[in-house]
Image (tube, rainbow, N blue to C red):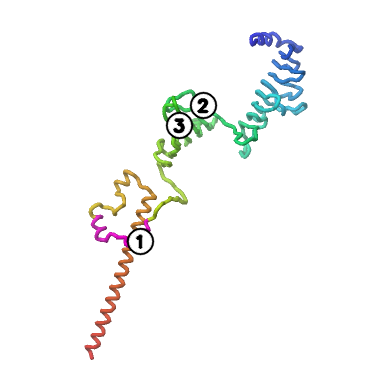
C-alpha cells in the first residue's frame, strides 16, 4: 500500500484538480500532498489547510486551536489530532517548541528567549511532564547524556556548563550512577560537584566519602552541629578532675592534652567538629574548676596573710608598751 501511495504522489504532483479516493485525498486544492477526508471534514493531512490556518503546516493532523478564519500563525504541527492534544508545535516566528501547547512560555525568564515547553493537559494529581535521556550502554563510566549550555559565538572554548549522569558500575542488572555538575572558567567545563549513587555530595572531589565532602575552604555565616550530650557531668558532685600535676606529666609524655587528638591523628583522620567541641568544652569546664579551686586558695592565703599581718602589728604595739 505504501509503495502504491508513493506512486500516486509522484505521478499526481503536477495535477491541478484534487485526486480523491473514498477517504484519502492525494493532492487537494490547497496543494497538500496527502490529506484524509472523513464525512466531508478534513482530519489528517500533510501540508497546509487554507480554510483554517493559511500559514501553518500540519504533518499528521491539524489543531483545534487553529480556528477557521484565524490570523496566520506561522507554525508547524506534528500530530495534532482533532481534539487539540498530543501534538508537537513549532512557532516559526519565535523559534519556540511546544509539546501539547501551541504557545510555549518562558514564564519568569526575561529577555529574548527560545523555549521548549512540555505541557501535560491533565489536571489530576501527579500530572507531570518528563524529559528522559536514555542510553543502551551498560558499561561502567558510560553517560546517558547531559543538559549543556553553550556560548556559540565564543572564539575558543564554547562550553559554559553541563549536568550529566554517569554509570558508576556495570549496569547489566541494575544501574548505579552519579550526577555530575561542571562549569567552565576559561577552559572546557570541569567537574565541580558530584552526587554519588548513595547520595553523598562531593565539592572539589570526585569520590565523596561522607554526606558532604569538600576539598577546599568553606565560608558560612553559621554552622550548626547537633550534639547529643554536652560534658556538663564535669560539674556533677563526685566528678574527679585530674590534678594540674597529672596534666603536666601527661603533656610532658605525649605532647598534647588528655583526650585531645594528637597532631598526627588529626592529620591522618581529620577532626570531627561535634566531638572536638565537646572535648574542648570539657577541658574548659575542668579548667574552670581548677580556677575556682585556685581562687578559693588565693582568698584563703590572702586572709591568712591578712590575719598574720594584723597579729604581728598588734604584737609590735604591745611590745612598745
Q: Position of residue 11 (x, y in %)?
A: 69, 8
Q: Which mark is residue 134?
A: 2
Pointer 3: what residue? 177
**In the rendered view of the protein, which quadrant contains the C terminus?**
bottom left
Disc 3, SS:
strand
Pointer 1: what residue? 236
Relative depth, front residue between 287 and 105:
287
Q: How far apart, in angstroms, are the residues tagged by discs 2 and 3?
A: 13 Å
Q: Earlier in the sequence, mark 1 or mark 3?
A: 3
74 in the magenta segment: no
Quadrant in the rendering for residue 238: bottom left
Who's the residue at 35% across and 45% down the image? Answer: 270
Q: How far apart, in angstroms, are the residues tagged by discs 1 and 2?
A: 63 Å
Q: Is residue 305 left or right of residue 7?
A: left
Q: Earlier in the sequence, mark 1 or mark 2?
A: 2
Quadrant in the rendering for residue 207: top left
Q: Is residue 29 visible?
A: yes
Relative depth, front residue between 273 and 231:
231
Residue numbers of the magenta segment: 231-251
**In the rendered view of the protein, which quadrant contains the N terminus?**
top right
Closer to the observer: label 1 or label 3?
1
Closer to the observer: label 1 or label 2?
1
Q: Position of residue 129 (x, y in %)?
A: 59, 32
Q: Which mark is residue 224?
A: none
Who's the residue at 25% across and 79% down the image? Answer: 308
Amino acid at each position: 500500500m505504501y509503495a502504491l501511495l508513493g506512486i500516486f504522489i509522484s505521478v499526481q504532483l503536477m495535477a491541478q484538480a484534487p485526486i480523491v479516493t473514498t477517504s484519502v485525498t492525494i493532492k487537494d486544492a490547497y496543494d497538500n500532498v496527502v490529506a484524509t477526508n472523513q464525512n466531508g471534514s478534513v482530519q489528517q493531512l500533510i501540508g497546509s489547510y487554507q480554510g483554517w490556518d493559511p500559514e501553518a503546516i500540519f504533518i499528521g493532523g491539524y489543531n483545534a486551536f487553529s480556528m477557521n478564519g484565524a490570523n496566520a500563525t506561522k507554525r508547524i504541527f506534528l500530530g495534532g489530532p482533532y481534539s487539540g492534544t498530543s501534538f508537537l508545535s513549532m512557532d516559526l516566528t519565535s523559534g519556540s517548541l511546544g509539546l501539547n501547547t501551541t504557545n510555549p512560555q518562558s514564564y519568569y525568564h526575561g529577555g529574548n528567549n527560545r523555549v521548549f515547553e512540555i505541557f501535560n493537559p491533565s489536571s489530576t494529581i501527579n500530572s507531570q511532564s518528563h524529559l528522559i535521556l536514555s542510553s543502551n550502554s551498560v558499561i561502567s563510566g558510560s553517560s546517558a547524556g547531559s543538559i549543556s549550555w553553550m556560548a556559540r559565538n565564543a572564539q575558543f572554548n564554547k562550553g559554559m556548563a553541563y549536568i550529566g549522569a554517569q554509570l558508576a558500575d556495570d549496569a547489566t542488572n541494575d544501574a548505579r550512577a552519579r550526577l555530575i555538575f561542571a562549569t567552565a572558567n576559561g577552559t572546557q567545563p570541569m567537574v565541580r560537584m558530584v552526587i554519588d549513587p548513595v547520595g553523598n555530595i562531593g565539592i572539589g572531589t570526585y569520590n565523596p566519602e561522607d554526606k558532604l565532602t569538600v576539598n577546599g575552604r568553606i565560608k558560612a555565616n553559621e554552622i550548626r552541629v547537633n550534639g547529643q550530650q554536652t560534658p556538663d557531668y564535669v560539674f556533677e558532685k563526685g566528678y574527679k578532675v585530674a590534678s594540674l600535676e597529672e596534666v603536666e606529666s601527661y603533656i610532658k609524655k605525649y605532647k598534647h592534652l588528655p583526650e585531645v587528638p594528637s597532631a598526627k591523628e588529626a592529620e591522618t583522620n581529620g577532626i570531627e567538629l561535634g566531638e572536638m567541641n565537646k572535648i574542648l568544652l570539657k577541658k574548659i569546664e575542668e579548667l574552670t574548676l581548677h580556677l575556682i579551686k585556685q581562687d578559693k586558695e588565693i582568698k584563703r592565703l590572702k586572709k591568712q596573710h591578712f590575719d598574720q599581718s594584723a597579729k604581728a602589728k598588734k604584737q609590735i604595739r604591745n611590745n612598745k608598751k
